[in-house]
Structures are given as structure tokens and as C-alpha cells.
Amino acid sequence: MKGNIKQSSVMKKGQAATEFLMTYGWAILAIVIVAAVLWNMGVFKGQCAKTAPVQVFGSGEQLQVSDWALTSAGVLTMKVKNLAGNDISITSGNMYLPSTWTTVANGTLAAGITVPAGGDNTVTITGSAAGASGECFTAGVDLTYDVVNGVSNHVITGIVRGKY
């Protein structure tokens, strides 16, 4: 008799542990997944994280911003890639600050910035968006371009975030 009582007590404890893990294990797994997604989105890295260029530009555009940097003097340099089948001629660029979304930098681009089909080039916009090195920034950007032997006055608009 004594052996059966001890075995029954151990079995009940094992069953309780298994039920606990099954009940709360799913909740713990869900919390871990949510935390991993938030970490991947940069929520825990702060506003100034720049793991990869943090940018929001529309998908499906013919012109893609692949990298960028903003100096403490307010000079925005962007590497743009041509996804169109023809050469692209960039005609103007602007930079905006989110506090008022007014233009702080009318881009004076070098005459005839051409991005060859499938290639890339560098665009520089100089303005008054200066800040101290290491400070956070958010800037709205738009580039106006023409597709050579195609439609004119395309505009790509986006937002870049990071540190000066």
C-alpha cells in the first residue's frame, strides 16, 4: 500500500508541473515572440538607432534610396539606385524638418545628375538642418526626376532617421 501512495503523490506533482508548463508556456512563448519582433523593429534601441538606414520610401519606385548620411553641418548625402529601364535625370531635391514640415533645404544639385539604368549615383542636398554630432534627427526628403526618353517630373518622397 505504501508504495502506491508515494507513486500517486509523485504522479500528481508531475501532472501539475506538466499542466503548468502547457498553460503558461504558450503565454511565455507569445511574450518572447512579441519582444523579438519589437527588438527587430528597433523599439528598444531608441529614437536614434541607425542599424541600417532607417528610411521610409514608397515601394515600387523607379528610384530607390539605398544609403544616406546627414552631417552636423546639415548636408544630406544619399546614394540612389535606378530601378527603371532607362537612365534617370535628377532635377531637384528638398529636405524638410518634421516639426513644421517646411522646406529647410532646397537642393541645389549639380547640373545633370544622371543615374544610369540599373546603376547608382550620389545626390547631395545642402541646407539649414544642422545639429550637433550624435544628436537625433528626422528629415523628410523628396527628389524630382525625369526618366530619359520617358515621363518627366516624377517625385519620390520619404523620411530618413538617425544621428548626425
Image (spheres, helix red, strand yellow):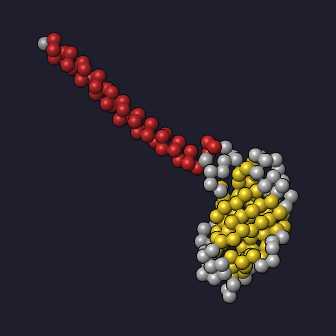
Q: As drawn, is 75 to the left or to the right of 88?
A: right
Q: Is residue 147 visible?
A: yes
The answer to whether residue 129 shows anywhere in this view is no
Residue sitting farthest toward the left: 1
In the image, 31 versus 137, the foreground residue is 137
Image quadrant where residue 79 sits: bottom right
What residue do we see at 45% from left, 36% from top? 28
The residue positioned 75% from the left and 62% from the top of the image is 77
Q: Quadrant of the N terminus?
A: top left
Of all residues shown, which one is farthest toward the bottom?
149
Q: Is residue 62 above or below residue 74?
A: below
Q: Position of residue 78 (x, y in %)?
A: 71, 64
Q: Residue at x 63, y 43 (%)?
A: 45
Residue 164 x %, y %: 76, 51
**Looking at the picture, how far across and down is residue 73, in whole percent?**
84, 55
Task: Residue 57: name its quadrant.
Answer: bottom right
Q: Is residue 35 above or below residue 74?
A: above
Q: How many marks?
A: 0
Does residue 37 sit above or below 123 in this rendering? Answer: above
Above or below, 112 relative to 99: below
* Residue 117 x %, y %: 62, 79
Residue projecting furthest to the right: 128
Q: Quadrant of residue 80?
A: bottom right
Q: What residue lies at 65% left-to-right and 71% top-to-bottom? A: 120
